[in-house]
Amino acid sequence: GVDLDWEYPGQRAEDNIFRPSDKDNFTLLLKDIREALDKEGKKNNTHYLLTIATGADQAYINNTDLENAHKYLDFINVMCYDYFNGWMHQTGHHANLHPSEKDTYKVNSGVEAIDRHIEAGVPADKLVMGIPFYGRQWAKVTSAKDGLYEQAREGGMIVAYWDVLEKIKTGNYKQMYEESAKASYVFNATDSIFISYETPK
């Protein structure tokens, strides 16, 4: 099948061209691809999947017509990560399940992202919550506490999961878990490094 990751219809991402007509054109594009896949599938009695990756915030919902678009889709992969990311010089959970009691910015959470999609008209059984197999690391964190929701001079770069585990093995990183957010993180107070990452918990 086909999986589309358009970042993002109707809004700026890194270097994409975007316009208001993206909202309707995205749905029309999905319709055309679905029809082409169904036509091809009839030749060999096969159902080809059509899926998309979606943004987790309200801006994504506002710039798409998911209520109609989902009719052409088998399922939707919601990008429930990068809430705090490399553009920010503020530490935070990058893939928390629930809102954090400590987050004064009220950035985002996995539950809120899924709820937004359901409220936009997407059936729950078509939604897949995306979980990152990587963390976000901030350096030169100005903190006397545990590094969470603190300023940092170096933004949240991507760090591989295996690399986080290796760092923990050094004994220099204190492992922590915020219960309200259902999110894990580590902090190296000596080197002022904060990492938000996913754990089985």
Image: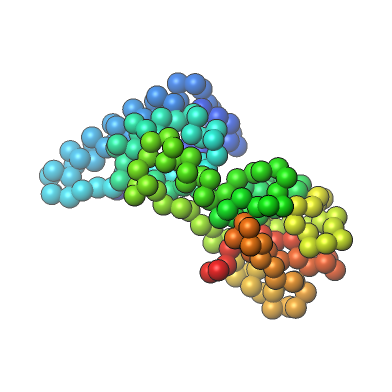
* Residue 143 place in picture, x, y as percent: 85, 58
> Which quadrant holds the C terminus?
bottom right
* Residue 174 place in picture, x, y as percent: 74, 71
At horizontal 30% and vertical 46% (from top left) the residue drawn is: 74
At horizontal 78% and vertical 59% (from top left) the residue drawn is: 147
Name above or below for residue 160 compared with residue 45.
below
Q: Identify the colour scheme used.
A: rainbow
Count of numbered badges drawn on the protein: 0
Taking depth in this image into account, of 14 and 8 the one nearest to the observer is 8
Quadrant of res 183: bottom right
In the figure, is residue 193 to the left or right of 81? Answer: right
In the figure, is residue 33 to the left or right of 43? Answer: right
Let me know if residue 3 appears in the view.
no
At horizontal 30% and vertical 36% (from top left) the residue drawn is: 71
Taking depth in this image into account, of 164 and 130 the one nearest to the observer is 130
In the figure, is residue 90 to the left or right of 28? Answer: right
Let me know if residue 45 appears in the view.
yes
Taking depth in this image into account, of 63 and 9 the one nearest to the observer is 63
At horizontal 83% and vertical 62% (from top left) the residue drawn is: 145
* Residue 186 place in picture, x, y as percent: 71, 66
In the figure, is residue 35 to the left or right of 134? Answer: left
Name above or below for residue 64 compared with residue 45.
above
* Residue 163 place in picture, x, y as percent: 64, 69
